[in-house]
Amino acid sequence: MREVLSIHIGQAGCQIGNSCWELFCLEHNIRPDGILFPESQNSASSMETFFHEVRNGRQVPRTLFVDLEPTVVDEIRTGKYRRLYHPDQLVSGKEDAGNNYARGHYMIGKEIIDLILDKIRRLSEQCTSLQGFLLFRSLGGGTGSGFTSLLMERLSVEYGKKSKLEFSVYPAPHISTAVVEPYNSILTTHTTLEHTDCAFMFDNEALYDICKRNLNVERPFYSNLNRLIAQVVSSITASLRFEGSLNVDLNEFQTNLVPYPRIHYPLTSYAPILSIEKAFHEQLTVSDLTNAVFKSNNQMIKCNPRYGKYMACCMFYRGDIVSKETNSAINSFKSRRNVQFVDWCPTGFKVGLNYQPPVFVPGSDNAKVPRALCMLSNTSAICEAFSKLDHKFDLMYAKRAFVHWFIGEGFENKGDFSEAREDLAALEKDYEECACDSDLNNNYVAEDEY
Protein backbone atom coordinates (compact mmCIF):
# COMPACT_ATOMS: atom_id res chain seq x y z
CA MET A 1 0.00 0.00 0.00
CA ARG A 2 1.05 3.61 -0.60
CA GLU A 3 -0.33 5.62 2.29
CA VAL A 4 -0.48 9.40 2.51
CA LEU A 5 -0.90 11.45 5.70
CA SER A 6 -2.91 14.69 5.45
CA ILE A 7 -2.15 17.48 7.94
CA HIS A 8 -4.61 20.41 8.09
CA ILE A 9 -3.19 23.47 9.83
CA GLY A 10 -4.93 26.66 10.93
CA GLN A 11 -8.42 27.88 10.09
CA ALA A 12 -8.03 27.64 6.30
CA GLY A 13 -6.35 24.21 6.45
CA CYS A 14 -9.03 22.75 8.72
CA GLN A 15 -11.90 24.13 6.65
CA ILE A 16 -10.35 22.80 3.43
CA GLY A 17 -9.94 19.49 5.26
CA ASN A 18 -13.69 19.41 5.97
CA SER A 19 -14.43 19.60 2.24
CA CYS A 20 -11.69 17.14 1.27
CA TRP A 21 -12.78 14.39 3.65
CA GLU A 22 -16.42 14.90 2.70
CA LEU A 23 -15.40 14.20 -0.92
CA PHE A 24 -13.08 11.28 -0.10
CA CYS A 25 -15.84 9.57 1.90
CA LEU A 26 -18.23 9.91 -1.05
CA GLU A 27 -15.60 8.57 -3.47
CA HIS A 28 -14.97 5.49 -1.34
CA ASN A 29 -18.63 4.98 -0.29
CA ILE A 30 -17.93 5.61 3.38
CA ARG A 31 -20.67 6.96 5.64
CA PRO A 32 -20.04 9.99 7.93
CA ASP A 33 -19.54 7.58 10.85
CA GLY A 34 -16.77 5.66 9.04
CA ILE A 35 -18.81 2.55 8.17
CA LEU A 36 -18.69 1.33 4.56
CA PHE A 37 -21.88 1.25 2.52
CA PRO A 38 -22.73 -2.40 1.59
CA GLU A 39 -22.19 -1.85 -2.16
CA SER A 40 -18.57 -0.76 -1.59
CA GLN A 41 -17.42 -3.93 0.18
CA ASN A 42 -15.90 -5.38 -2.99
CA SER A 43 -14.96 -2.13 -4.75
CA ALA A 44 -11.70 -1.80 -6.68
CA SER A 45 -10.63 1.35 -4.83
CA SER A 46 -7.59 1.32 -2.62
CA MET A 47 -8.96 3.26 0.31
CA GLU A 48 -5.97 2.26 2.46
CA THR A 49 -4.14 5.26 0.94
CA PHE A 50 -6.29 7.68 2.93
CA PHE A 51 -8.12 5.43 5.43
CA HIS A 52 -7.05 3.00 8.13
CA GLU A 53 -9.45 0.16 9.02
CA VAL A 54 -9.88 -0.48 12.75
CA ARG A 55 -11.16 -3.49 14.64
CA ASN A 56 -14.90 -2.82 14.36
CA GLY A 57 -14.74 -2.30 10.57
CA ARG A 58 -14.70 1.48 10.72
CA GLN A 59 -12.54 3.45 8.28
CA VAL A 60 -10.52 6.12 10.10
CA PRO A 61 -8.88 8.88 8.00
CA ARG A 62 -5.09 9.13 8.04
CA THR A 63 -5.20 12.79 9.00
CA LEU A 64 -4.50 15.36 11.66
CA PHE A 65 -6.30 18.67 12.23
CA VAL A 66 -4.24 21.30 14.08
CA ASP A 67 -5.13 24.83 15.12
CA LEU A 68 -3.70 27.01 17.88
CA GLU A 69 -7.19 28.14 18.87
CA PRO A 70 -10.23 25.87 19.36
CA THR A 71 -13.07 27.46 17.34
CA VAL A 72 -12.65 25.75 13.96
CA VAL A 73 -11.61 22.36 15.38
CA ASP A 74 -14.62 22.49 17.74
CA GLU A 75 -16.88 22.84 14.69
CA ILE A 76 -15.43 19.56 13.37
CA ARG A 77 -15.86 17.92 16.79
CA THR A 78 -19.57 18.75 16.70
CA GLY A 79 -20.16 18.57 12.92
CA LYS A 80 -21.59 15.96 10.57
CA TYR A 81 -18.33 13.98 10.38
CA ARG A 82 -17.51 14.06 14.12
CA ARG A 83 -17.71 10.23 14.39
CA LEU A 84 -15.36 9.75 11.43
CA TYR A 85 -12.25 11.03 13.22
CA HIS A 86 -10.39 9.62 16.18
CA PRO A 87 -10.48 12.25 19.00
CA ASP A 88 -6.66 12.35 19.04
CA GLN A 89 -6.69 13.54 15.42
CA LEU A 90 -8.34 16.85 16.36
CA VAL A 91 -5.81 19.03 18.18
CA SER A 92 -6.42 22.61 19.26
CA GLY A 93 -4.61 25.00 21.58
CA LYS A 94 -6.06 27.71 23.76
CA GLU A 95 -4.31 30.79 22.37
CA ASP A 96 -4.41 32.05 18.78
CA ALA A 97 -1.34 33.05 16.76
CA GLY A 98 -3.13 36.33 16.03
CA ASN A 99 -2.08 36.64 12.35
CA ASN A 100 1.54 36.74 13.53
CA TYR A 101 4.14 34.46 11.95
CA ALA A 102 6.47 34.91 14.92
CA ARG A 103 3.82 33.81 17.45
CA GLY A 104 3.01 30.71 15.42
CA HIS A 105 6.65 29.79 14.89
CA TYR A 106 8.56 30.90 17.98
CA MET A 107 6.12 31.32 20.85
CA ILE A 108 2.85 29.36 20.88
CA GLY A 109 3.89 26.89 18.19
CA LYS A 110 6.89 25.76 20.25
CA GLU A 111 4.56 24.67 23.06
CA ILE A 112 2.52 22.30 20.88
CA ILE A 113 5.05 21.04 18.30
CA ASP A 114 6.23 17.97 20.26
CA LEU A 115 2.64 16.81 20.81
CA ILE A 116 1.91 17.15 17.07
CA LEU A 117 5.06 15.26 16.07
CA ASP A 118 4.14 12.45 18.46
CA LYS A 119 0.69 12.16 16.87
CA ILE A 120 2.24 12.16 13.38
CA ARG A 121 4.63 9.43 14.50
CA ARG A 122 1.69 7.29 15.65
CA LEU A 123 -0.12 7.81 12.35
CA SER A 124 3.01 6.92 10.36
CA GLU A 125 3.49 3.72 12.38
CA GLN A 126 0.10 2.51 11.10
CA CYS A 127 1.41 2.73 7.51
CA THR A 128 3.21 -0.06 5.68
CA SER A 129 4.70 2.16 2.95
CA LEU A 130 4.26 5.86 3.71
CA GLN A 131 4.47 7.88 0.47
CA GLY A 132 4.49 11.30 2.03
CA PHE A 133 2.55 14.18 3.55
CA LEU A 134 -0.08 16.55 2.23
CA LEU A 135 -0.13 19.83 4.17
CA PHE A 136 -3.07 22.24 3.91
CA ARG A 137 -2.74 25.82 5.14
CA SER A 138 -3.02 29.52 4.40
CA LEU A 139 0.15 31.55 3.90
CA GLY A 140 -1.37 34.72 5.32
CA GLY A 141 -2.47 33.49 8.76
CA GLY A 142 -0.35 33.21 11.88
CA THR A 143 -0.84 29.46 12.42
CA GLY A 144 -0.76 28.60 8.72
CA SER A 145 2.48 30.50 8.17
CA GLY A 146 4.39 30.31 11.46
CA PHE A 147 3.43 26.93 12.87
CA THR A 148 3.58 25.20 9.46
CA SER A 149 7.14 26.50 8.97
CA LEU A 150 8.16 25.05 12.31
CA LEU A 151 6.44 21.73 11.54
CA MET A 152 8.03 21.47 8.07
CA GLU A 153 11.49 22.00 9.54
CA ARG A 154 10.93 19.15 12.00
CA LEU A 155 9.34 16.85 9.38
CA SER A 156 12.38 17.33 7.14
CA VAL A 157 14.60 16.09 9.96
CA GLU A 158 12.45 13.08 10.91
CA TYR A 159 11.00 12.14 7.49
CA GLY A 160 13.62 13.52 5.11
CA LYS A 161 13.03 11.04 2.27
CA LYS A 162 9.22 11.34 2.22
CA SER A 163 7.39 13.64 -0.19
CA LYS A 164 5.98 16.81 1.35
CA LEU A 165 3.33 18.48 -0.78
CA GLU A 166 1.60 21.72 0.19
CA PHE A 167 -1.85 22.99 -0.74
CA SER A 168 -1.66 26.65 0.22
CA VAL A 169 -4.08 29.55 0.07
CA TYR A 170 -1.93 32.36 -1.31
CA PRO A 171 -2.72 36.07 -0.72
CA ALA A 172 -4.93 37.34 -3.54
CA PRO A 173 -3.98 40.52 -5.43
CA HIS A 174 -7.04 42.57 -4.34
CA ILE A 175 -8.69 40.55 -1.56
CA SER A 176 -7.09 40.41 1.87
CA THR A 177 -8.14 39.09 5.26
CA ALA A 178 -5.18 40.53 7.22
CA VAL A 179 -2.98 43.62 6.97
CA VAL A 180 0.23 41.69 7.69
CA GLU A 181 -0.41 38.99 5.05
CA PRO A 182 2.63 40.04 2.97
CA TYR A 183 4.96 39.66 5.98
CA ASN A 184 3.58 36.25 6.98
CA SER A 185 3.58 34.92 3.42
CA ILE A 186 7.11 35.94 2.52
CA LEU A 187 8.54 34.77 5.84
CA THR A 188 6.91 31.34 5.57
CA THR A 189 7.78 30.93 1.86
CA HIS A 190 11.42 31.65 2.71
CA THR A 191 11.44 29.20 5.64
CA THR A 192 9.70 26.31 3.85
CA LEU A 193 11.36 26.74 0.44
CA GLU A 194 13.93 24.01 1.06
CA HIS A 195 11.58 21.73 3.01
CA THR A 196 8.70 21.49 0.50
CA ASP A 197 8.89 19.23 -2.54
CA CYS A 198 5.94 20.82 -4.33
CA ALA A 199 3.55 23.64 -3.39
CA PHE A 200 0.16 24.04 -5.09
CA MET A 201 -1.17 27.55 -4.60
CA PHE A 202 -4.75 28.81 -4.70
CA ASP A 203 -5.94 32.35 -4.22
CA ASN A 204 -9.41 33.30 -3.09
CA GLU A 205 -9.86 35.94 -5.78
CA ALA A 206 -9.37 33.40 -8.58
CA LEU A 207 -11.69 30.94 -6.81
CA TYR A 208 -14.36 33.64 -6.28
CA ASP A 209 -14.22 34.49 -9.98
CA ILE A 210 -14.61 30.82 -10.95
CA CYS A 211 -17.65 30.50 -8.66
CA LYS A 212 -19.28 33.63 -10.11
CA ARG A 213 -18.45 33.02 -13.76
CA ASN A 214 -18.69 29.23 -14.10
CA LEU A 215 -21.10 28.25 -11.32
CA ASN A 216 -23.36 31.34 -11.22
CA VAL A 217 -22.82 31.75 -7.47
CA GLU A 218 -23.05 35.48 -6.82
CA ARG A 219 -22.00 35.37 -3.16
CA PRO A 220 -19.71 32.36 -2.64
CA PHE A 221 -18.98 31.08 0.85
CA TYR A 222 -15.65 29.53 1.85
CA SER A 223 -17.35 26.13 1.55
CA ASN A 224 -17.89 26.82 -2.19
CA LEU A 225 -14.21 27.60 -2.64
CA ASN A 226 -13.04 24.67 -0.53
CA ARG A 227 -15.05 22.18 -2.59
CA LEU A 228 -13.20 23.35 -5.70
CA ILE A 229 -9.86 22.81 -3.94
CA ALA A 230 -11.06 19.35 -2.79
CA GLN A 231 -11.69 18.29 -6.41
CA VAL A 232 -8.11 19.27 -7.31
CA VAL A 233 -6.68 17.31 -4.36
CA SER A 234 -8.83 14.32 -5.31
CA SER A 235 -7.60 14.40 -8.92
CA ILE A 236 -3.94 14.57 -7.90
CA THR A 237 -4.29 11.61 -5.53
CA ALA A 238 -6.77 9.55 -7.62
CA SER A 239 -3.95 7.46 -9.10
CA LEU A 240 -3.00 6.25 -5.63
CA ARG A 241 -6.56 5.17 -4.85
CA PHE A 242 -8.26 3.96 -8.04
CA GLU A 243 -7.44 1.86 -11.07
CA GLY A 244 -6.26 3.45 -14.29
CA SER A 245 -4.38 2.59 -17.45
CA LEU A 246 -1.65 5.16 -16.72
CA ASN A 247 -1.45 5.84 -12.99
CA VAL A 248 0.99 8.40 -11.60
CA ASP A 249 2.23 8.34 -8.00
CA LEU A 250 3.45 11.33 -5.99
CA ASN A 251 7.14 10.84 -6.78
CA GLU A 252 6.51 10.30 -10.47
CA PHE A 253 4.76 13.58 -11.17
CA GLN A 254 7.30 15.53 -9.10
CA THR A 255 10.09 14.02 -11.18
CA ASN A 256 8.41 15.31 -14.34
CA LEU A 257 7.22 18.64 -12.96
CA VAL A 258 10.09 20.10 -10.92
CA PRO A 259 13.16 20.85 -13.08
CA TYR A 260 15.17 22.34 -10.18
CA PRO A 261 14.53 22.02 -6.41
CA ARG A 262 13.51 25.69 -5.92
CA ILE A 263 11.23 25.78 -8.99
CA HIS A 264 8.40 23.87 -7.32
CA TYR A 265 5.35 26.17 -7.48
CA PRO A 266 3.07 24.77 -10.20
CA LEU A 267 0.05 26.58 -11.58
CA THR A 268 -3.14 24.58 -10.93
CA SER A 269 -6.03 24.42 -13.42
CA TYR A 270 -9.18 22.29 -13.39
CA ALA A 271 -11.92 21.60 -15.94
CA PRO A 272 -14.82 21.29 -16.28
CA ILE A 273 -16.21 23.59 -13.60
CA LEU A 274 -19.86 23.83 -14.64
CA SER A 275 -23.15 24.66 -13.00
CA ILE A 276 -25.88 22.03 -13.21
CA GLU A 277 -27.82 24.17 -15.72
CA LYS A 278 -24.85 24.44 -18.10
CA ALA A 279 -23.69 20.81 -17.85
CA PHE A 280 -26.55 19.43 -19.98
CA HIS A 281 -25.51 21.64 -22.91
CA GLU A 282 -21.79 20.84 -22.94
CA GLN A 283 -20.11 18.10 -24.95
CA LEU A 284 -16.99 17.83 -22.73
CA THR A 285 -14.71 16.08 -25.23
CA VAL A 286 -11.11 15.36 -24.23
CA SER A 287 -9.98 18.08 -26.62
CA ASP A 288 -12.36 20.59 -24.97
CA LEU A 289 -10.98 19.78 -21.52
CA THR A 290 -7.37 20.02 -22.72
CA ASN A 291 -7.97 23.46 -24.23
CA ALA A 292 -9.93 24.63 -21.18
CA VAL A 293 -7.15 24.03 -18.61
CA PHE A 294 -4.81 26.36 -20.51
CA LYS A 295 -7.29 29.24 -20.22
CA SER A 296 -6.75 31.70 -17.39
CA ASN A 297 -10.41 31.54 -16.28
CA ASN A 298 -9.90 27.92 -15.09
CA GLN A 299 -6.73 28.69 -13.11
CA MET A 300 -6.74 28.59 -9.33
CA ILE A 301 -4.37 31.56 -8.98
CA LYS A 302 -4.43 35.03 -10.52
CA CYS A 303 -1.69 35.40 -13.12
CA ASN A 304 -1.53 35.67 -16.89
CA PRO A 305 0.02 32.53 -18.45
CA ARG A 306 0.73 34.46 -21.68
CA TYR A 307 3.48 36.36 -19.87
CA GLY A 308 5.49 33.24 -19.09
CA LYS A 309 6.84 30.07 -20.62
CA TYR A 310 5.84 26.55 -19.67
CA MET A 311 8.56 24.18 -18.44
CA ALA A 312 6.41 21.10 -17.85
CA CYS A 313 2.74 20.12 -17.65
CA CYS A 314 1.24 17.19 -15.76
CA MET A 315 -2.23 16.28 -17.05
CA PHE A 316 -4.41 14.18 -14.72
CA TYR A 317 -7.32 12.87 -16.79
CA ARG A 318 -10.02 10.94 -14.98
CA GLY A 319 -13.22 9.21 -16.03
CA ASP A 320 -14.32 7.89 -19.40
CA ILE A 321 -11.08 8.58 -21.31
CA VAL A 322 -8.61 6.43 -23.30
CA SER A 323 -4.97 7.20 -24.10
CA LYS A 324 -5.58 7.62 -27.84
CA GLU A 325 -7.93 10.56 -27.13
CA THR A 326 -5.44 12.26 -24.81
CA ASN A 327 -2.55 11.87 -27.26
CA SER A 328 -4.68 13.25 -30.08
CA ALA A 329 -5.88 16.20 -27.96
CA ILE A 330 -2.36 17.12 -26.78
CA ASN A 331 -0.87 16.83 -30.29
CA SER A 332 -3.68 18.96 -31.68
CA PHE A 333 -3.10 21.57 -28.96
CA LYS A 334 0.68 21.60 -29.56
CA SER A 335 0.18 22.15 -33.30
CA ARG A 336 -1.74 25.40 -32.68
CA ARG A 337 1.20 26.92 -30.78
CA ASN A 338 -1.15 28.77 -28.44
CA VAL A 339 1.32 28.52 -25.55
CA GLN A 340 5.07 28.92 -25.32
CA PHE A 341 7.31 26.19 -23.96
CA VAL A 342 10.97 26.64 -23.05
CA ASP A 343 13.26 25.32 -25.75
CA TRP A 344 15.21 23.10 -23.33
CA CYS A 345 12.22 20.86 -22.52
CA PRO A 346 11.05 19.41 -25.85
CA THR A 347 8.60 16.83 -24.46
CA GLY A 348 6.65 19.06 -22.10
CA PHE A 349 3.73 16.80 -21.09
CA LYS A 350 3.28 14.07 -18.49
CA VAL A 351 -0.09 12.29 -18.69
CA GLY A 352 -2.00 10.30 -16.08
CA LEU A 353 -5.20 8.35 -16.83
CA ASN A 354 -7.60 7.18 -14.17
CA TYR A 355 -10.93 5.37 -14.68
CA GLN A 356 -12.69 6.90 -11.66
CA PRO A 357 -14.90 9.85 -12.74
CA PRO A 358 -15.26 12.90 -10.48
CA VAL A 359 -17.82 12.39 -7.72
CA PHE A 360 -20.72 14.81 -7.28
CA VAL A 361 -21.05 16.25 -3.77
CA PRO A 362 -24.72 16.65 -2.75
CA GLY A 363 -25.54 20.31 -2.24
CA SER A 364 -22.51 21.58 -4.18
CA ASP A 365 -22.71 23.89 -7.19
CA ASN A 366 -20.42 21.88 -9.48
CA ALA A 367 -22.36 19.52 -11.77
CA LYS A 368 -21.83 15.77 -12.06
CA VAL A 369 -19.66 15.10 -15.13
CA PRO A 370 -18.36 11.88 -16.76
CA ARG A 371 -14.76 13.09 -17.11
CA ALA A 372 -12.44 15.80 -15.82
CA LEU A 373 -8.90 17.09 -16.16
CA CYS A 374 -6.58 18.63 -13.59
CA MET A 375 -3.41 20.24 -14.93
CA LEU A 376 -0.34 21.12 -12.90
CA SER A 377 1.94 23.29 -14.99
CA ASN A 378 5.32 24.69 -14.07
CA THR A 379 5.40 28.08 -15.72
CA SER A 380 7.40 31.25 -15.20
CA ALA A 381 4.07 33.17 -15.22
CA ILE A 382 3.71 32.34 -11.51
CA CYS A 383 6.31 35.10 -10.94
CA GLU A 384 3.48 37.59 -11.37
CA ALA A 385 1.89 36.36 -8.13
CA PHE A 386 5.24 36.57 -6.30
CA SER A 387 6.05 40.06 -7.60
CA LYS A 388 2.67 41.48 -6.51
CA LEU A 389 3.19 40.12 -3.01
CA ASP A 390 6.80 41.36 -2.91
CA HIS A 391 5.61 44.85 -3.87
CA LYS A 392 3.11 44.90 -0.96
CA PHE A 393 5.89 43.72 1.38
CA ASP A 394 8.24 46.47 0.16
CA LEU A 395 5.66 49.21 0.69
CA MET A 396 5.10 48.16 4.32
CA TYR A 397 8.68 47.29 5.19
CA ALA A 398 10.02 50.59 3.79
CA LYS A 399 8.22 52.25 6.72
CA ARG A 400 8.97 49.32 9.08
CA ALA A 401 5.20 49.23 9.69
CA PHE A 402 3.94 46.51 12.07
CA VAL A 403 7.47 45.08 12.44
CA HIS A 404 7.49 45.59 16.23
CA TRP A 405 4.77 42.93 16.64
CA PHE A 406 7.09 40.33 15.14
CA ILE A 407 10.21 41.48 17.02
CA GLY A 408 8.30 41.26 20.30
CA GLU A 409 7.27 37.65 19.67
CA GLY A 410 10.60 35.92 19.22
CA PHE A 411 12.24 37.46 16.15
CA GLU A 412 15.83 38.22 17.13
CA ASN A 413 16.37 41.05 14.67
CA LYS A 414 14.90 42.80 11.65
CA GLY A 415 17.43 41.08 9.40
CA ASP A 416 15.10 38.09 9.13
CA PHE A 417 12.71 40.23 7.07
CA SER A 418 15.46 41.37 4.68
CA GLU A 419 16.80 37.84 4.32
CA ALA A 420 13.33 36.46 3.48
CA ARG A 421 12.69 39.26 0.94
CA GLU A 422 16.07 38.63 -0.76
CA ASP A 423 15.24 34.92 -1.02
CA LEU A 424 11.94 35.71 -2.76
CA ALA A 425 13.74 38.08 -5.14
CA ALA A 426 16.19 35.25 -5.90
CA LEU A 427 13.25 32.89 -6.51
CA GLU A 428 11.75 35.33 -9.03
CA LYS A 429 15.15 35.54 -10.72
CA ASP A 430 15.40 31.73 -10.81
CA TYR A 431 12.07 31.50 -12.63
CA GLU A 432 13.11 34.19 -15.11
CA GLU A 433 16.36 32.37 -15.86
CA CYS A 434 14.49 29.10 -16.40
CA ALA A 435 12.31 30.83 -18.98
CA CYS A 436 15.34 31.99 -20.97
CA ASP A 437 16.27 30.07 -24.09
CA SER A 438 19.30 27.84 -23.76
CA ASP A 439 22.48 28.87 -25.55
CA LEU A 440 23.52 25.72 -27.40
CA ASN A 441 26.40 27.51 -29.09
CA ASN A 442 28.40 27.87 -25.90
CA ASN A 443 31.47 25.68 -25.88
CA TYR A 444 31.66 25.29 -22.13
CA VAL A 445 29.79 23.15 -19.66
CA ALA A 446 28.17 25.13 -16.87
CA GLU A 447 28.82 23.99 -13.33
CA ASP A 448 25.98 22.01 -11.78
CA GLU A 449 24.44 24.42 -9.31
CA TYR A 450 22.26 21.84 -7.61
Image (cartoon, helix red, strand yellow):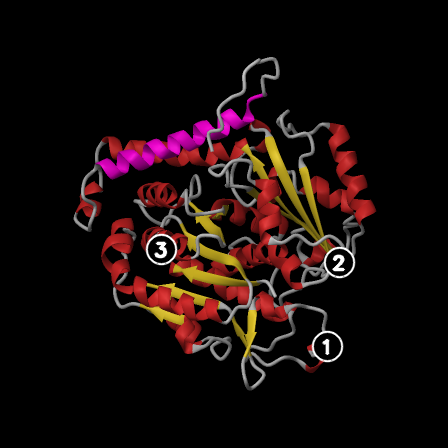
Question: Which SS class for mark 1?
Answer: loop
Q: Is residue 426 above or below residue 438?
A: below
The residue where tag 1 is placed is 42
Q: Mark 3 or 2, which is nearer the eye?
A: 3
Q: In this view, does 222 lie to the left or right of 45?
A: left
Q: In this view, does 5 lie to the left or right of 293?
A: left
- The percent coordinates of residue 310 (x first, y second) are 60, 32
Query: Marks 1 and 2, how far apart in space?
Result: 22 Å
Give the class, few, some or many, for how many residues have Cα within 10 Å of label 2's Cα (few <14, many ≥20).
Answer: some
Residue 301 visible in the snapshot? yes
Give the class, few, some or many, for how many residues have Cα within 10 Å of label 1's Cα (few <14, many ≥20).
Answer: few
- The percent coordinates of residue 289 (x first, y second) are 72, 45
For the magenta stretch, what is the residue range? 415-437
In this orientation, which residue lies closer to the viewer: 255 or 139? 255
Q: Point out which mark residue 370 bears.
A: 2
- The percent coordinates of residue 268 (x first, y second) are 57, 45
Question: Which SS class for mark 2?
Answer: loop
Q: Mark 1 or 3, which is nearer the eye?
A: 3
